[in-house]
Image (cartoon, rainbow, N blue to C red):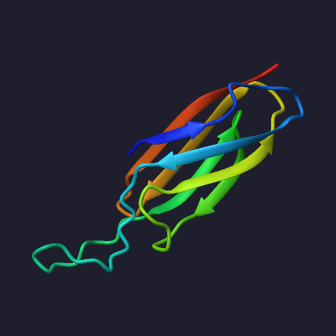
Amino acid sequence: MTARIQIPAQAKPGEVIEIRVLIQHPMETGYRYDDAGKPIPRNTIRTLNCRYDGIEIFSAELGPGIGANPYLQFTTVARASGDVEFSWVDDEGVAGSERQRLVVA
């Protein structure tokens, strides 16, 4: 699983910034069937966390109502330069993470 994170290239201290993430994941609900008529096992992202400079700023529990390749956006206040890191775990126990550096000057 991979993710694309969009944050400003640079921010000023105290500025409200928008963070966007798109995670490539099939988000199978467990309600669909394959071509042979067998149920496709459920596999959704269970937990998604975002840390900014080591501090959790966003957390979500996702479920089968979220479509494939989930996209989320939220805002936070730029305090200091640091990494914005997303991490997630799906129903199969597969974990993923992606990070991007935020420069505050």
Name which residue lies at 36% across and 65% down.
43
Quarter occupied by residue 100 = top right
Q: Eyeballing the image, is 42 above or below 52?
A: below
* Furthest-top residue in this view: 105
84 with respect to 65 (left or right): right
Q: Is residue 54 left or right of residue 70?
A: right
Q: Residue furthest left?
A: 36
| Badge count | 0
Location of residue 54 (image quadrant): top right
Q: Is residue 13 above or below residue 67?
A: above
Residue 45 at x, y percent in the picture: 46, 60
Q: Is residue 13 left or right of residue 40?
A: right
Residue 104, x across and y down, in percent: 79, 23
Nearest the camera: 73 or 38?
A: 73
Q: What residue is drawn where x is 56% and y is 33%?
A: 99
Q: Nearer the viewer, residue 33 or 79?
A: 33
- Where residue 9 appears, as percent x and y from the top left, is 68, 25
On the picture, is 57 further left or further right than 36?
right
User: What residue do we see at 65% from left, 51% from top?
Assistant: 73
Q: Position of residue 65 (x, y in %)?
A: 49, 74
Query: At x 84% / y 32%, what residue is drawn?
Result: 79
Q: Farthest right residue? A: 14
Q: Quadrant of the C terminus?
A: top right
